[in-house]
Amino acid sequence: MHRCCSGFLLLLAIIFALPLTGCLGKSSNNNGSTGVESVSLSPTGTFSLDIGTTQVFSATARNANGGTVLGADIQFIVQSADPNSAAPLSIASNGNACAGTWDASFAICSPGSSGVALVSAVSNGVSSAQTTVYVHQHVASIQIQSAETQPQPYDCFSQGQTWVYQGTAYSSNNVDISDTVGPLNWSFSSIGVVTTTPFVPPQQPKVLNQVQTTAKSPGITQIFASISGTTSTPFPYSTCLIQAVYLQIAGQSEAGNSVTVNNGGAVSVTAIAVDSLCGIANQTPLSNPPLTWSTTDPEVMAFSTTASTALSNSATARNNLGGATITASCTPPSCNIGVLPGAPVYASNYDVNASPAPKCQPVGLVKGYGAISVDVISSTIPPTPPTYTAWAATTSCQNVPGCSSALFAVTPGTTPISTIVGLPRTPNSLLFNHLAASRLYIGSNQGLMYVDVGGANPTVNVVSNQTTPCNVSLCGKVLTISNDGKLVVISDTISTPSQVYIYNGSGSATPIDLIVPGESAVAAAFSPDQLKVFILTNTGNMYVYSTVDALSSVPIATSVTDVKFAADGSFAYISGTPASSVSGYSTCGLPNVASTNIGTVTTSTTPSAIFPSPVLPLPVLQGGTLLPTQQSILALEPPTGSNANSSIEFLTAEFSQDPLLYQLPGAPLNCNPPTMNSFTRGPLFNLGQGELTPVFQGLVDDGAELIIVARKVGAVLVFNVANGTTSSIPLVGNGTDPLSADASTDGSQVYVATCDQYAQDGVTCAAGSVHIVDTISQGDLQQVPYVNINNDNDTNMCNNQGGTATVCFPNLIAIRPQ
């Protein structure tokens, strides 16, 4: 009787199990399922299905070591999340699921009803985590709206503010089916502006269509909600833009905008950044402003971290003595994100007691500044200028195939030449990276080269082993390097049409190729924050390149000669547009206008070069009004009229930043170009040397001296900015003709590559050397002719030309930063 009963019960178990095969699938029996410790099911988590659609599930059984158990017996199980209704999903033994019911052959899926199914996989008694499947009618559209009960106060949110939105899903007959589709997926068009977190209202566990937004970085974006392949219309969202930035020197608070520091020391600067709701909302500065920290001379002062959300940052004084200005800005694409054209905001002066009162008055702020001027001096007493090393090369190989040009280091002392490197291509320009002091970029007509000179055995690297095409090898002259040391601008006038390349020194990006047909780039400069590069051409165009905005050109005069950026980086001084003038052009652009002329000053003639001073006077209240930022500019000008000599003319620019104001909903978001309050012309100082053709000119020693080295002038000229006098330090030798020169940032040392003697034809150089001039002791201390110490003291810098070839001498030189 007992045995018979057992058999009967077994038969019943089999019979009752048969109807479950529509929701309980089973793979073929396999003895390999033993040892199963875990089962994983895919897809996992939560997803949704339209009624009548299908989904493939798969599962993997794993042993204790995490390895796959091959041939494991796996069953797929589905059940309804609502115990009072049938599961809206059926699943075959192979994992194919139907949002409804399968036919007998598991080939046709018939639509069912809406509901929630729970799917799991089981092997050897071990079950996977459940996957929740929401089965619903087709979502025809999704609309986003506020889920808050109170009205939204403004059209933007200050950093850190939260708000809850919800997406309503509608069927094709416009019925709200949000409660059946499950959690919505939330995304946005611009990264960094907002963070989103799914939000389930308290006591409402089935409300899954809401999201809590948190304002992150200033900018604009669009929020999207999506489910089952349907995406909502874009919903605009804005984290309030930064409207103003004010700076203070840490430890000095509002006391001043200038500081002196020893080389090797540091200057800490605090930034107060306020958004467009200041004065409307709580007047509280941002706690994590995404600012860009900049310097006008990274060889003197440099930030180790140029992008930071901290309220302060520290710049280190390098061993290159001299002056620089440091500042901070809200620079796209990390700040004021998504605004096109880009809307950078540069630091500005602030005084709470100004009249009229500032438009935004952050709580507790008394004074702030737009830029900080720093004078780096020697830490020793008496001051000891650093000993610099220069690197010299020659252009005299004339691009002859097989001719190897020498590149050598020159240091004062008994053995001035210590390192010699062979260049496989004829160089045409040398420029050191401002920050990575060991990297020297070398332009050539066959392609860009660079040498890391810091090691014992430096070697030459080429961007491309092939010399053609030029847009791959990057032919041309090196014009400038960005202040962060990453980007190099090369002007290619060899190719047709002419081109400008922007090379990323890290090698992590493809070079940018800018076509400038029929034009030659004559000068270029990066804004201190690296947002834009201004490229001047000989045909009267200024090309403005940015990773944020499209390449654009601005009409200027064909007489342009030079471009340098202002202390706060908000605009650039451009000489020669129009002729006999200097103009200011904004860094930020307006729709269809890449840069705006904010002011022009007339000069005696068209300057050949301009030099903004790193010294900034302290802005003070005058008649209740805070004076704008004031900066002096020195202009080197050729002879004019009765004056047969080149001259230095003093210019003064006074400029200010207007804060970005709160915009009404729907109003366009544009930058505010700075205001040129005044641009004036001062005294003109005659240099007394006739018309100069400079091979080098540089403002050094914290703006105290302008050093000029010119062709056919056998001396280093030193112009004293304070009293307007010029002194000269003669170069040793009669008829010495400077071909190239470079000066240290403190002006203590000048290296001059010269032709010391010409042949009878007056054109061919018969002897040349590098002169090491000490401006403190007022002497040409050492003349270093090239001698190949590794090749029988050969004096020819050009190799492989044969014994009758003309001897090559140094005519390119660059000082390595400390």
Image (tube, rainbow, N blue to C red):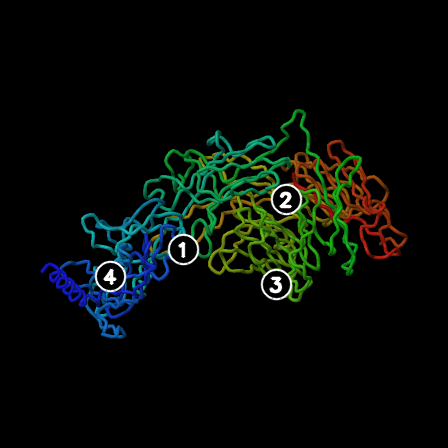
Q: Nearer the viewer, residue 353 or 313?
A: 313
* Mark 1 or 4, nearer chain start: 4
Evaluate if marks 1 and 4 touch, with contact meaning CB atoms under 8 Å apart.
no
Evaluate if marks 3 and 2 touch, with contact meaning CB atoms under 8 Å apart.
no
The residue beneath circle 2 is 611
Residue 581 visible within the image: no
Name the amino acid, label 4: Ile
**Which callout, 3 or 2, points to the residue nearer the camera?**
3
Residue 279 picture quarter: top left
Crowding near the residue tagged with mark 3, few <14, some 14–19, many ≥20 C-alpha atoms within 10 Å? many
Residue 159 picture quarter: top left
| Separation of marks 1 and 4 at Cα, in angstroms | 41 Å
Name the amino acid, label 2: Phe
Classify the position of the C terminus by image quarter. top right
Q: Is residue 86 left or right of residue 524?
A: left
Q: Nearer the viewer, residue 207 or 741?
A: 207
Q: Is residue 14 left or right of residue 360?
A: left
Residue 491 point in image, percent of width and height: 65, 57
Name the amino acid, label 1: Ser
The residue beneath circle 4 is 77
The residue beneath circle 1 is 190
User: Which type of secondary structure does the marked residue at label 3 adopt?
Assistant: loop
Evaluate if marks 3 and 4 touch, with contact meaning CB atoms under 8 Å apart.
no
The residue that appears at 18% across and 48% down in the rendered structure is 203
Q: Nearer the viewer, residue 261 or 7?
A: 7
| Separation of marks 3 and 2 at Cα, in angstroms | 27 Å
The residue that appears at 46% across and 32% down in the rendered structure is 254
